[in-house]
């Protein structure tokens, strides 16, 4: 029953989020449905039309819509968005989360407390410039800032990561930009449990930094035990990602599951006491949540501890229970409290892996059960890795377009020792907090982590086994899971009907690929991309892409993102020319020399490298139909051009403001 309820709540969350439903509507429906549900639950006969079941489904659906509406504060009377956001106001904000900084900015998710003198609610992105000489804000810090919120900019290039959409799925719709000189930090902010957790984690990290750990080793220790990945170097993170072992660096279900098994073993003597099983369960759950507190109560650790708390209860019953119901119940509990977790990639991958392990692992063990204990344990580890990888493969391809074929090697070499590493790590933290950590334990643990990094690095260097840049869209995601489920079902119970379903799924998958191929062969597109200090045109003909640029070394990921999404096979680089003919339309590119085109009335004039021209005279003399400006120009110059075009009634498109320009569509276009 919990599985059905969870599925309907999930559907309600999806509908409520994308349909933008005001919470009052589902709340009214909930009250009515609960009343009817209570009445029909007592009067429905055992046979006949299932009124009770249908009303339960409708109630679960409305519940999902309601909780996501509350999470996004959509239509709530005290939400800050009901203010006039155009004018400046005094904002009182409380930092809820410190995001990973970049070289230019420090970013924080902040809770809105006051706007002016009115109490408000909602979450907002606070952006401050990076300044190594100044103290960074911490969780629970409260600040006053005089500013006006801005909408978060959508991506400026096609198929670029959509940070705006990512934040919206966390209930964040606006940002406030300021600097540390323009904000006032409250001296005695009110503490919260989350702030205390973050403070305790920082205290642990400061203790570990005093010990003789290597830089890379300490960064991995912080990630492995405390969920703090900000200090991991890009090369180390890439190694773990390419080796298919990046899950080791996130405190998640793997770590909590190992910790649960260790606690189950260590606390076995408690079962001899009166009501010992209940006492053991309470102690285990308390210790799991203590670990979550130490790890900073991050979303990944919260969902993992919630899931394994239910699993610990199931294990304490010591009777057969449906693991799927336990997992579904944990999902339901998490989503009722934090419905926006549903849209997080980590949440999706975590539960996909758990479902796959619970379903596929027993089937693999029944398929082959070696008598030799070494072979049997190796097969068990391999079975878990294969099951988990099969569960997350479609999601991984959809989001990351990469598959590490040697994932089982890194898992076989590391996972058997991960319990020992975690146990040793907890001991190291405890002794470091008590200032009793001996040097030999520091050296031993440091060597262990260095060896783990070396193993991962060796696997990651086998680049021929890392399949990258795999195009995989939403339709393929759905079909991928359909095929995987059909395959496992067919192999566990070979029946011709399920075989037909499996091969039918493969056929549909291939038909979709052929249709995409046909569409691509007929496609020709020219796109003006946005890139600072560079001019980039992307010319696609079928599955071939020509990159026209003034600086081919300064492309970033924009060409690769486009190539993967459009299934490009061949990419070539070419220098820019001053003039291009696109069918019946003419594009003229003016660079810093400011030379006027010889032909009159070009369809497009692209201004690059801030040419020193009188734009009004240019418009009068050649009469272009549209002016374009890209990221190679100074912003103050672009603003001047924009005003001139507005006065002359000429359409103006700046890629730094409106996003990339698609010449085929002939309209400004930014990815949504």
Image (tube, rainbow, N blue to C red):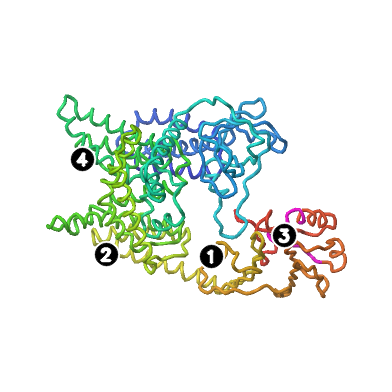
Q: Residues within 10 Å of mark 1 (few under 14, many from 20)?
A: some
Which quarter of the picture shows residue 3?
top left
Which-is-in-front pick, marks 2 and 1? 1
Q: Secondary structure at mark 1?
A: helix
Q: State the SS at label 2.
A: helix
- Label 3 vs 1, first from the N-terminus: 1
Magenta extent: 624-637
Q: Nearer the viewer, mark 3 or mark 1?
A: 3
Q: Which mark is residue 320?
A: 4
Most extreme residue toward the left is: 371
Question: x, y (%) of residue 628?
Answer: 73, 62
Q: Earlier in the sequence, mark 4 or mark 2?
A: 4
- Pointer 3 residue: 633
Depth check, mark 4 against mark 1: the one in front is: 1
Q: Residue 251: name its quadrant.
A: top left
Q: Which label sits in the foreground, 3 or 2? A: 3
Residue at the spot of label 1: 560
Based on the picture, tell me whether residue 244 belongs to the magenta stretch.
Answer: no
Say which residue label 2 marks.
Answer: 496
Residue 435 placement (x, y as % from top left): 34, 33
């Amino acid at each position: 029953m919990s599985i059905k309820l969870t599925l309907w709540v999930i559907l309600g969350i999806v509908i409520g989020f994308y349909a933008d439903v005001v919470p009052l509507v589902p709340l009214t429906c909930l009250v009515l449905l609960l009343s009817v549900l209570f009445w029909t639950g007592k009067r429905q006969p055992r046979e006949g039309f299932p009124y009770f079941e249908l009303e339960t489904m409708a109630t679960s659906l409305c519940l999902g819509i309601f909780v996501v509406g509350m999470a996004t504060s959509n239509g709530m009377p005290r939400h800050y968005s009901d203010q006039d956001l155009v004018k400046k106001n005094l904002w009182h904000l409380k930092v809820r989360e410190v995001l990973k900084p970049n070289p230019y900015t420090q970013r924080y998710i902040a809770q809105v407390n006051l706007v002016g003198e009115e109490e408000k609610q909602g979450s907002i992105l606070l952006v401050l410039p990076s300044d190594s000489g100044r103290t960074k804000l911490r969780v629970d810090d409260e600040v006053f800032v005089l500013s006006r919120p801005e909408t978060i900019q959508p991506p400026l290039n096609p198929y670029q990561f959509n940070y705006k959409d990512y934040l919206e799925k966390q209930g964040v719709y606006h940002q406030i930009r300021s600097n540390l000189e323009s904000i006032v930090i409250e001296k005695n902010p009110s503490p919260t449990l989350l702030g205390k957790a973050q403070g305790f984690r920082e205290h642990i990290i400061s203790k570990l930094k005093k010990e003789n750990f290597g830089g890379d080793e300490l960064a991995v220790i912080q990630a492995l035990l405390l969920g703090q990945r900000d200090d991991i170097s890009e090369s180390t993170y890439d190694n773990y990602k390419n080796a298919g072992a990046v899950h080791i660096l996130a405190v998640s279900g793997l770590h909590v599951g190992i910790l649960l098994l260790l606690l189950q073993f260590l606390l076995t003597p408690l079962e001899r006491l009166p009501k010992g099983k209940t006492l053991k369960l309470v102690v285990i759950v308390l210790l799991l949540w203590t670990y979550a507190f130490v790890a900073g109560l991050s979303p990944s650790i919260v969902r993992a501890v919630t899931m394994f708390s239910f699993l610990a209860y199931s294990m304490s019953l010591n009777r057969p229970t449906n693991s799927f119901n336990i997992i579904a119940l944990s999902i339901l509990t998490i989503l009722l409290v934090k419905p926006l977790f549903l849209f997080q990639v980590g949440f999706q991958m975590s539960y996909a892996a758990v479902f796959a392990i619970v379903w596929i692992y027993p089937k693999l063990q029944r398929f082959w059960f070696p008598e030799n204990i070494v072979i049997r344990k190796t097969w068990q580890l391999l079975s878990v890795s294969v099951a988990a990888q099969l569960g997350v493969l479609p999601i991984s391809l959809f989001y990351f377009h990469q598959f590490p074929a040697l994932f089982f090697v890194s898992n076989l070499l590391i996972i058997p020792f991960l319990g020992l590493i975690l146990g040793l790590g907890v001991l190291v933290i405890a002794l470091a907090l008590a200032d009793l950590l001996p040097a030999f334990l520091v050296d031993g643990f440091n060597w262990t982590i260095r060896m783990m990094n070396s193993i991962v690095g060796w696997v990651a260097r086998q680049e021929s086994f890392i399949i990258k840049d795999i195009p995989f869209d939403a339709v393929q995601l759905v079909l991928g899971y359909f095929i995987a489920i059909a395959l496992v079902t067919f192999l566990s119970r070979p029946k011709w009907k399920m075989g037909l379903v499996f091969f039918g799924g493969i056929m549909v998958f291939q038909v979709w690929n052929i249709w995409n191929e046909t569409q691509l062969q007929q496609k020709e597109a020219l796109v003006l991309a946005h890139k600072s200090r560079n001019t980039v045109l992307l010319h696609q003909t079928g599955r071939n892409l020509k990159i026209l640029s003034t600086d081919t070394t300064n492309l970033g990921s924009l060409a690769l993102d486009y190539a993967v999404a459009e299934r490009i096979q061949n990419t070539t680089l070419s220098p820019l020319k001053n003039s291009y003919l696109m069918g019946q339309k003419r594009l003229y590119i003016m660079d810093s020399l400011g030379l006027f085109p010889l032909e009159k009335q070009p369809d497009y004039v692209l201004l690059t490298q801030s040419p020193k021209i009188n734009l009004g005279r240019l418009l009068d003399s050649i009469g272009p139909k549209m002016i374009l400006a890209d990221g190679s120009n100074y912003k103050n110059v672009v603003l001047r051009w924009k005003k001139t075009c507005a006065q002359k009634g000429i359409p103006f498109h700046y890629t730094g403001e409106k996003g990339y320009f698609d010449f085929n569509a002939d309209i400004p276009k930014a990815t949504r």
